[in-house]
Image (tube, grey):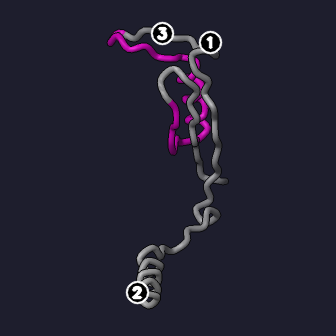
Amino acid sequence: MNRLSARILILSLFLNFAPMAWAGEAGWEYKVVVLQGLAAGGSFEKQASGVYTDTKRTKALNEMAADGWEVVAVIGVPGADHTVYLRRKSN
């Protein structure tokens, strides 16, 4: 039984092997922004299509995009705070 478990362990190590990626190689700069939810007093505007847009959050994200930031991921639920992960190339 020990030989079988040793073989399985060695095989799993080879299957899960992946070359390491160094964060410094690409030259990325990262930023995490918390966009507060409804309780923070966002300013909502109804679009012609009937969709409501939070102009305060939209303006903040557009300003960061103008500075070269791009969205990597967003974590949140409707009506609550959203955590936005951004990156841009380092100078």
Residue segment shown in magenta: 48-76
Query: Residue extending furthest left?
Result: 49
What numbered label is drawn on residue 4? 2
Residue bearing the label numbered 1? 41
Question: Secondary structure beneath disc 3?
Answer: strand
Task: State the image coordinates of residue 35 (x, y, percent, origin top left).
Answer: 60, 27
Identify the image quadrant of the N terminus.
bottom left
Q: Is residue 51 magenta?
A: yes
Gap in angstroms between the C-alphas marked 3 and 2: 64 Å
Q: Amino acid at mark 2?
A: Leu
Residue bearing the label numbered 3? 45
Count of numbered tags: 3
Q: Amino acid at mark 3?
A: Glu
Q: Amino acid at mark 1?
A: Gly
Above-or-below relation of 61 to 70: above
Classify residue 68 as left or right of residue 1. Answer: right
N-term-proximal mark, 3 vs 2 = 2
